[in-house]
Image (cartoon, grey):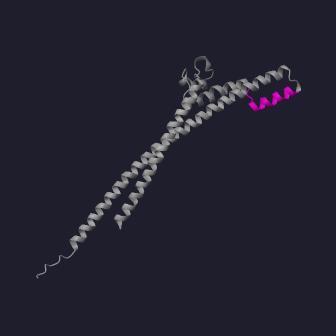
Amino acid sequence: MRAFVDRFVSWISVVIAIVLLVAGGLLMWAHSFIGDQVHTQLSQQQITMPGGTALTTPLMKKELGKYSGQTMTTGPQAKAYADYFIAAHLKEIGGGKTYAQISTEQMAAVAANPNSATAQKLTEIKTELFQGNTLRGLLLYGYAFATMGTIAGLAAFASFAGAIVLLILAGLGLWHAGRKNATSTAASTGGAAVPEPQIV
């Protein structure tokens, strides 16, 4: 009975290991595909990471200095550029106000006098904020996908590791079941009565 249980558990482990290997393969493919797509899309933008005098605050220097002069190709670069360079300039352009707040002021100014200097200035600011926020959002989407790719890669390695462990345990279980069978067979043979020869 014990040998049967060992075999049953071992074969279940083999099946689970196969499932993990397949899942690991798919996750590794996803990791590679997402990584290639993020790299390609970011490279096509031809964005050079700022450095030197363009980094005007200590926070910019801390977060962007390590990428200075590099072409943006990775998720972390995209996030740093979006959060610590674009966001800082958008805050400066809008005077600390959001796109929605500037848009409300611009529409009110245009309604009052579309040709006024205030209306024209607010329209320019609104356009710059819209473009900047759009680029920032796209870069953060790139970072999000890159993070998903990284997680998929880690999950793939975890799946492969789990499959290896299960295959080892399954092998040990089948070996143990084989020993149990051999021991049981030897014991039953040794304990059986030897028939006496018959004289015809």
Give the residue at x 59% y 33%: 142
Residue 103 is one of the magenta-drawn residues: yes
Q: Quadrant of residue 67?
A: top right
Residue lying furthest left = 199
Residue lying furthest top = 53
Residue 169 is one of the magenta-drawn residues: no
Q: On the rendered image, what quadrant is the N terminus found in?
A: bottom left
Q: Quadrant of residue 9?
A: bottom left
Give the residue at x 41% y 55%: 13
Range covered by the magenta-colored residues: 94-111
Give the residue at x 68% y 24%: 89
Residue lying furthest front = 200
Q: Is residue 174 above or below residue 107?
A: below
Give x and y (percent) for residue 150. Answer: 52, 38
Closer to the camera in the image, 43 or 160:
43
Give the residue at x 63% y 29%: 82
Predominant SS along the magenta part? helix
Residue 155 appearing in the image: no
Q: Is residue 198 above or below residue 136?
A: below
Give x and y (percent) for residue 184. Answer: 27, 67
Q: Is residue 47 left or right of residue 104?
A: left
Give x and y (percent) for residue 167. Answer: 38, 51
Q: On the rendered image, what quadrant is the C terminus found in?
A: bottom left
